[in-house]
Image (cartoon, rainbow, N blue to C red):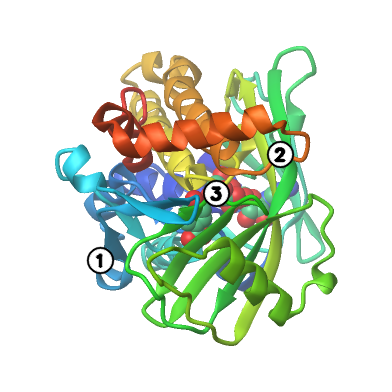
Amino acid sequence: MHTQVGIIGAGPSGLLLSHLLHLNGIESIVLENRSRQYVEERIRAGVLEQGTVDLLNDSGVGARMQKHGMVHRGLDLLFEGKRHRIDLGELTGGKAVVVYGQHEVVKDLIQARLDAGGQILFEVGDVSLHDLTAAQPRIRFVKDGVAEEIVCDYIAGCDGFHGVSRAAIPSGVIREFERTYPFAWLGILAQAAPAADELIYAHHERGFSLFSMRSPQITRLYLQCAPDEDLAAWSDDRIWNELHTRLETDDGWKLNEGPIIQKSITPMRSFVAEPMQYGRMFLAGDAAHIVPPTGAKGMNSAVADVKVLARGLTAALRDQGTDLLDAYSTTCLKHVWRKQHFSWWMTSMMHRFADNTAFQDHMQLSELNYLVRSRAAATMFAENYVGASVDSQ
Ligand code: APR
Ligand code: PHB
């Protein structure tokens, strides 16, 4: 088998790359080790920046998002029992975010690729990468018990943090920057109408909490918990009690409860690998960088990479030069580090750190108070949240 671009991973990065390349007349094959059902049902964050929304619309995969996505022009920061609205639209010259589950984006992209005759091979095993610095790198894998090989012009490593692509780069070539946090998020989906139209990020002495949503019928909620938290110790009653406590406001607002249909734990990590390329292989999305979920930058960061990569690969494969591709990592690392900083900063400001002194608690609250009182500070927050800051896209 031969393809122009061999893509490892059918998450948002790999699928969007394959779709954009197809629109440019470049063929690719996507290899995914999980099943189609698994990737379509994997619950992740669900806040799309304006740039992500625009790219999905402009590339023709935005129809369901336009129908079911919820446009949010503001959000609340809740601390010391009071809600403070950040008017994202007003502070950013009319920009907004769209709340639409990442797995819905994945479904839309898979459908678009299959409708266009694209090749996505699900449930492949033993994926390995070879000759990355040669003119024709190769991917080996096993499908239905048969060993296969694809000869490629380029390879895109879109296989997430635990994938094989980054690991295939010889040690010493890549520099890794990492920070782990002493907490995780316990996330639930509840069959309950969201009790507010906008997200609420809550700072509380018992720990961070987040009110979000997926649809007019489904509420999405998170609680800061221990990194090794045992889900079995969290009965539905305990979860609701904790949510009510952490999301309590002085204005009488209350969550709607309903049956909990999904529970999971999300670890928190900041990670960047530099450079994001080696020979003829390019890393995109979680394969190259991870953010903690505060601020929901993960998928937006991945989409921003893929936009640059699709352009670079297209130019190279049309014999228009490799300048864009050569500069891929340098170009991407600008938006990558901007989003890293914002996610780290928001995480640090909103969470309870077990070893925080009373002084540090005051620092968090003073920063939050400043953020909601100063237009300059609120604008900084809003620009980053919607992805309109310098270097964000
Ligand atoms: N071979 C083939 N596929 C693999 C392999 C492998 N060895 N290892 C991992 N994969 C697949 C995973 O099963 C997954 O479907 O690669 C895909 C990577 O997808 P994501 O983890 O969703 O990463 P990405 O597409 O970069 O999307 C980034 O996902 O994790 C969130 O917060 C993150 O929202 C961000 C987005
Ligand atoms: C979500 O709805 O899952 C979500 C929203 C905002 C975040 C993180 C996750 O910052």
The spot of residue 33 in percent (x, y) is: 70, 57
Mark 2–mark 1 Cα distance, whole angstroms, equals: 39 Å
Residue in the picture at 59% in, 52% down = 204
Q: Quadrant of residue 309?
A: top left
Label for residue 66? 1
Query: Position of 379 compared to 152: left or right?
Result: left
Q: Residues within 10 Å of mark 2 (few under 14, many from 20)?
A: some
Residue 47 in picture, x, y percent from top left: 41, 54
State yes or no: discs 2 and 3 in contact (Cβ < 8 Å): no
Name the residue nearer the viewer: 53 or 379.
379
Residue 203 image label: 3
Q: Residue at x 80, y 68 (%)?
A: 231
Give yes or no for contact between labels 2 and 1 (Cβ–Cβ under 8 Å): no
Whether residue 156 appears in this view of the structure is yes
Badge count = 3
Q: Amino acid at mark 3?
A: His
Foreground pick, 51 / 366: 366
Mark 1 vs mark 3, CA separation in Å: 32 Å
Q: Which residue is mark 2?
A: 353
Note whether 347 is above or below 141 in the view shown: above
Quadrant of the drawing holding the C terminus: top left
Query: Badges 1 and 3: C-beta atoms under 8 Å apart?
Result: no
- Give the structural element (helix, strand or loop) at label 2: loop
Left or right of 62? Residue 338 is: right
Q: Which of 322/268 is in front? A: 268
Residue at left 33%, top 29%? 377
